[in-house]
Amino acid sequence: MNLKLVFIPILGLLLLNGCQSDPEQKKSDFKIMTDAKKNVFKSGDPLNLTLVNKKNRKIDSVLYTINDEPIENGKTLTDQKLGKQGIEATIYSEGEIQKTTETITILNNFSPNVLQFEILNTYPHDINSYTQGLEFYDGMLYESTGQTGKSKLRKIDYVSGKVIENIDLANDYFGEGLTVMNGKIYQLTWQSRMGFIYDIDTFKRTGSFKYGASKEGWGLCHDNDMIYKSDGTEKIWLLDPQSMKETGYIQAYTNKGKIVGLNELEWVNGRIYANRYQKNGVAIINPKNGAIEAVIDFSPLRDLVKKHPKLDVLNGIAYNPQTQSLFVTGKNWNKLFEVKILEN
């Protein structure tokens, strides 16, 4: 038998099968259309969908989902996350199952409330601290600072400004936000895609974690069950505290559109407070859907700190549950402000 002659047809058959398209990747005969201009909705709007049947196929049934959760055509968008969301239609037609997708944008249905503040106290702050993260734990203030070669993790007596504990990060790391949970300090770095874990009592590093789909490390906070992480975009990522894996995200949106540059985060009474990089405001965000419900204008504070060449932007917000007040500072500011938020 000529093995060469047998092998050639078999090889040709394998190549032919390899070139055939996967049935699941077949271009759909259907397309989703909405009645919203540019597919932009507001929370509370009905989701009216039309299925364009390009080849006039017989349709037995259609299942619509939004982010893998079933949703009825015409259903009001009340419980969905804001921002860009994926709609998928699974079509049962003539013994086949086809799928098609479309992206919609969901905005908030009201504009953010603008809140004012009152200064309660002023405390000293290290003018050389390029503040990135700030958080209270058992009455002590924990601070993460940035800049390559100058990044630190600190435990501070906030009344006197005295540094109780200090760790210098390696010169190749740029420190970012932090949060304290379950006896551990979690600290981000900026573009190294690496975070560090420390023991709250010994201040010794006990572990590290890598980032997933998030672009960079900016800010952290937690609600006792979940850790929230910003990356400089409109996204706030949800991290499993056990594995530090990203399990999803919310997107910060107003009634006009997305808000990017989310930086330092703080959990305050069921809401995420986030300052925007290079801005003087703090956004108050609903953690369930990403809606920016209010903003606080802290621009007057910069006029109250010492002017010097390294003076930089507002950054650093921490809620002290013992005083039930908010503390605010900035990069290379010489003061830490205790403030009360005034409800309108």
Image: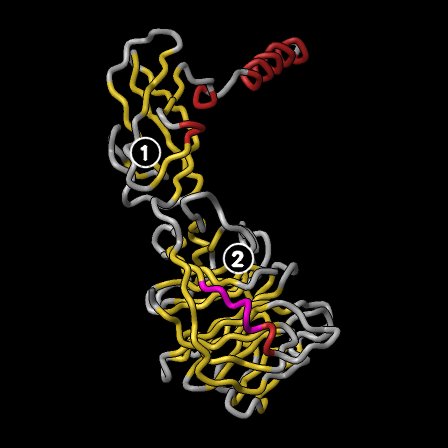
Side of 74 where 196 appears, left or right: right
The answer to whether residue 187 is visible is no
Side of 221 where 133 appears, left or right: right
From the viewer's side, name the closer residue of 108 and 218: 108
Q: Is residue 297 magenta?
A: yes
Residue 165: image quadrant is: bottom right
- Gap in Å between the C-alphas at discs 1 and 2? 29 Å
Does dot 2 land on a helix, a strand or a loop? strand
From the viewer's side, name the closer residue of 128 and 237: 128
The answer to whether residue 31 is visible is yes
Rendered view: 155 above or below 107: below
Rendered view: 336 above or below 104: below
| Region rendered in magenta | 296-301
Question: Which scheme is used to colour this image of the protein?
Answer: secondary structure
* Residue located beneath label 2 in the image: 262
Foreground tag (1 vs 2): 2
The image shows residue 309 at horizontal and vertical percentages of 75, 73
Q: Amino acid at mark 1?
A: Thr
Q: Sequence order check: which comes first, mark 1 or mark 2?
A: 1
Rendered view: 45 above or below 176: above
From the viewer's side, name the closer residue of 158 and 313: 313
The image shows residue 9 at horizontal and vertical percentages of 61, 10
Other residues around mark 1 within 10 Å, as few (<14) / some (14–19) / many (≥20): some
**Total numbered badges shown on the rendered structure:** 2
The image shows residue 305 at horizontal and vertical percentages of 62, 78
Residue 65 numbered mark, or none: 1
Does dot 1 land on a helix, a strand or a loop? strand
The image shows residue 131 at horizontal and vertical percentages of 60, 73
Q: Amino acid at mark 2?
A: Leu
Rendered residue at 37%/67% (across/down) = 223
Rendered residue at 39%/17% (across/down) = 30
Residue 129: image quadrant is: bottom right
